[in-house]
Amino acid sequence: MTTIAIIGAGRGLGAAVARRFGAEGMSVALISRSQGKLDALAEDLGKEGIHARGFAADVRDPESIAAALEAATETLGPIEVLQYSPLPQKDFMRPVLETTPADLKGPIEFSIYGPVAAVHQVVPGMRFLGENRGTILFVNGGSAVKPGRAVTGTSVAFAGQAAYAQLLNEVLGEEGIQVSQLIIGGRIIEGDPEKDPAVLAGILWDLHTRRDTFRHQVSAD
């Protein structure tokens, strides 16, 4: 049994992805800052027959991310899928002329240093699984491809993450490791035909299994 590690796991998209991939037989490593919330989510998923465990980490601390992913591998089994989808903090979203160098530190740690640390931790294990097994999934808001003047931190940092993801797609694709990015315009909305968490989880599953698409965008809002 292999594992999907969801960085930024919560009760919205993270839980939906856990259910989708868990239904296919994967173990689920739930990663976010609050161990208590993770344990409660893992317990709820367990009642649905999904093997899930929580591992607390701060995405702005690369050593914390690496340690959580190592613990997940030791506890649940090799990580076949990594999803990087933490929700940005509100103070990352300032108007462009009010954004100082200090204001960009958090978004860059969050959206660039965090995923780089995560990727370096999981890629060796994905290589060991063999060709056409490993997958890295990035989930971003619309400012990753269309910067917004009122959300400067995420616009700058998401753009950097998108560039990093595309470079990974080119290089790791040569080894059979799939790298894909899901862009979600606007809010995730329960019951929406395009942006319901379960619908988005299905898209992420397709990106993992079909292995032929780098970027999929849902809604340009």
Image (cartoon, helix red, strand yellow):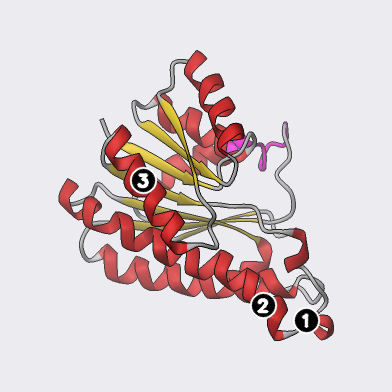
Of badges 3 and 1, the one in the foreground is 1
Q: Distance between the residues labelled 3 and 1?
A: 35 Å
Front in this rendered view, residue 99 or 206: 99
Q: Mark 1 or mark 2, which is nearer the start of the sequence?
A: 1
3D distance between C-alphas at marks 2 and 3? 29 Å
Q: Is mark 3 on a helix, strand or loop?
A: strand
Residue carrying label 1: 99
Measured along the vertical axis of the image, is residue 11 above or below residue 135?
above
Say what secondary structure mark 1 lies in: loop
Q: Can residue 130 be seen in this view?
A: no
Give the overall secondary structure of the magenta segment.
loop
Q: Which amino acid does label 3 sit on?
A: Val
Q: Distance between the residues labelled 2 and 1?
A: 7 Å
Mark toward the viewer: 2 or 3 = 2
Q: Left or right: 81 with respect to 149?
A: left
Q: In which quarter of the image is the N terminus?
A: top left
Q: Mark 3 points at which residue?
A: 81
Instruction: Please name the residue shown 48% across and 69% down the image.
Output: 113
The residue lying toward the viewer, choosing from 26 and 205, is 26
- Measured as percent of width and height from the top left, residue 207 is found at 42, 48
Amino acid on which the number 1 mark rests in the picture: Thr
Residue occupied by mark 2: 104
Residues marked 2 and 1 touching at CB (< 8 Å) = yes
Residue at the spot x=66%, y=37% of the render?
196
